[in-house]
Image: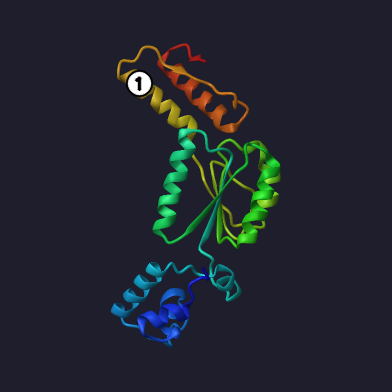
Amino acid sequence: PRPVRLSDIAKRAECSVAAVSHVLTGSGTGRIRVSSHRADEIKRLAQEMGYRPNLAARQLAGKKSGILGIITDQLLTATHSRMLAWLQHHATAQGLHVLIAQTNNEGGRVRDSVNEFASRGIDGLIYNAYLNDQHWPEACAALESCPRVVSVFGRPSIKNAHFVDVDVAEGVRLAVHHLAEGGRSKIVLIRSSEDHTLWSKERVRGFTKANQELGREPEAF
């Protein structure tokens, strides 16, 4: 079936195409007035008829696409799943569409993902540097072309980029003290195959410091 057009919605709503365009795309601001009741009816009909906005047309008109790109190294761990589910939830609440790319810990995949996102006209990108810090030089070169970048656990050397910095070592140290105060006598750190990453090294540093403060010999597996 052909895509639903603004004129189709206008016919059902018994109003002008300009009014429908104003409600659904924001055009006509300051020139066209639509009552809240009529606007709600137009939105209801648009959803009922399966209307999808033309993102390419919006971008040509200089408007935002409403698309957010997220790059992560893998989707296998519970930590990644929870974080991505949280991002998806809040992005949807803001009316954004989310595209997710998985690099599988391969540096070259970052540039490929950025190029793919660029072709979709993303408004911004979240880069999950959870286990990707060894790829920063290559990643930064690719991320510089993005309109807005937010890095999770990593400080990119990109102008105007933002980052979320997590004190992993302090978190582990506090966790060990919490367990010790609760009477736990056998506290161990399970190490992974990714111990070369900054995140893993910070975990070990916090665990070692906590055990030193408690006068214990740290145990890790």
The image position of residue 25, as x and y in percent, is 47, 75
Residue 179 or residue 82, whichever sits in front: 82
Whether residue 140 appears in this view of the structure is no
Depicted 217 relative to depicted 129: above or below: above
In the image, residue 169 sits, relative to residue 55, either above or below, namely above
Q: Residue at x 43, y 26 (%)?
A: 173
Q: Which residue is mark 1?
A: 179
Tell me the residue at 49%/30% (across/down).
169
Residue 37 x %, y %: 28, 78
Q: Is residue 7 above or below residue 221?
A: below
Location of residue 135 in the rendering, given as x and y in whole percent from the top left corner = 67, 39
Q: Residue at x 55, y 32 (%)?
A: 199
Quadrant of residue 132 in the image? top right
Q: Amino acid at mark 1?
A: Leu
Disc 1 element: helix
Q: Residue 106: percent from the left, percent from the top?
A: 67, 38
Asked if one can make out residue 165 in the rendered structure from this viewpoint, the answer is yes
